[in-house]
Amino acid sequence: MRAAGGRYGRLGAFALALALTGAAFAAAPAAAPVRAIVSGTAHQALFAIALDGRQGIAVGAGGALLESADAGASWKPSAKPLTELSLLGAALCQGRAVLVGQQGLIFARHADGAAWAKADSGTQNRLFAVRLNAKGFAVAVGAFGTVLKSEDGGAHWQAAAPSWVTIMPQGEEPHLYAADIDDAGIMTIAGEFGLILRSADGGASWKVLHKGEASIFAFDFRADGVGYAVGQSGALLRTVDRGQAWTELASGTQALLLGVSAGSDGRVVVTGMHDMLVSGDDGKSWQHVADPEVMTAWYQGVARAASSPAPLAVGHAGQIIAVGN
């Protein structure tokens, strides 16, 4: 049975396509600096950003595609659009790149500067997220429980979804919004019903790591195993063992939290609808970003270049912003 709903699950049509522990919360918003790097127009929107070394890719509505060759300091739009459909996810790793979007759309590029090639995804379902590792293994997820895997940098894909009836007894096929694949090929995915799942055998079997009420829209793991997941109704989770166990944190908001980036320096940035949260102490305390641009708009994808302390976020009006110094 397919669950009704759009990009954000049981919330209805949405314009983007699209007792708690521990953490303290600041009483007043923080004056965290937000700096615009790219500004578009009111009808534009960017949904995802990927950074790897000095390379960067940002994608969005109407096939928007921007690239950076200086770790996100500057951006250039694609000279020739690949599609008029919206691109919803992007991945970069050691020169390879994969883009996903509406109607099962996938484009792959085997090296920086090479031509993009359209891949056959085998589905018409929207694909919301994609990740790629150094060996060229990739995972993409999307609507109605879609999970795809690739072993050749995104050129070819095959289904890797769990048998949903074993996880969802009522037969739902949950929308999946976030994905990760590590260097060992271990895949982690997340989405509706608070689901966070993991497969260590290429999708042959899946383990449930978390299940709840609020949809999970994004997660991010550090190399040391610390990670964060965010989602519906201000959902904010933390792990110290790369997702084997999760602890709920008090986010201090009921906003849709759409993206998260966790740095090794303990700085965490969470994007959302009309809200943005920052922590400078690895999730022990949180503050709102007090910027009118943030408080009246939305930002979604967020990523951080290794050479920069300031994460970059993408969102409304085709904007790319740096959060922090």
Image: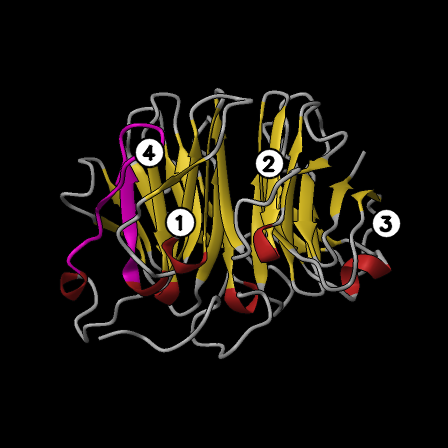
Query: Which amino acid, mark 3?
Result: Ala
* Mark toward the viewer: 1 or 4: 4
Q: Earlier in the sequence, mark 4 or mark 2?
A: 2
Residue beneath label 1, please? Answer: 246
Q: In this rendering, would 233 be left or right of 285?
A: left
What amino acid type is highlighted by mark number 1?
Trp
* Residue picked out by circle 4: 155
Q: Quadrant of the C terminus?
A: top right
Pinpoint residue 24: horizontal percent, then vertical percent.
Answer: 65, 54
Classify residue 215 as left or right of residue 28: left
* Number of numbered labels in the structure image: 4
- Closer mark to the observer between disc 1 and disc 3: 3
Labels 3 and 4: the sequence-earlier one: 3
Distance of label 1 from label 4 (alpha carbons): 34 Å
Q: Earlier in the sequence, mark 2 or mark 3?
A: 3
What is the x, y in percent for residue 86? 54, 56
Mark 2–mark 3 Cα distance, whole angstroms, equals 28 Å
In x, y percent, where is residue 128? 44, 54
Can see residue 156? yes
What predominant SS class does the magenta segment belong to?
loop
Residue 31, numbered circle: 3
Mark 2: secondary structure: strand
Which mark is nearer the camera, 2 or 3? 2
- Colour basis: secondary structure
Which segment is the magenta one? Answer: 145-163
Amino acid type of the residue that numbered disc 4 sits on in the rendered structure: Ala
Above or below, 169 against 259 in this view is: below
Residue drawn at point x = 43 percent, y = 76 percent: 10
**For mark 4, does the 10 Å Cα neighbourhood hold few (<14), some (14 to 19), or many (20 or more) residues?**
many
Mark identifier at residue 313: none
The magenta stretch spans residue 39: no
> What residue does disc 2 label?
57
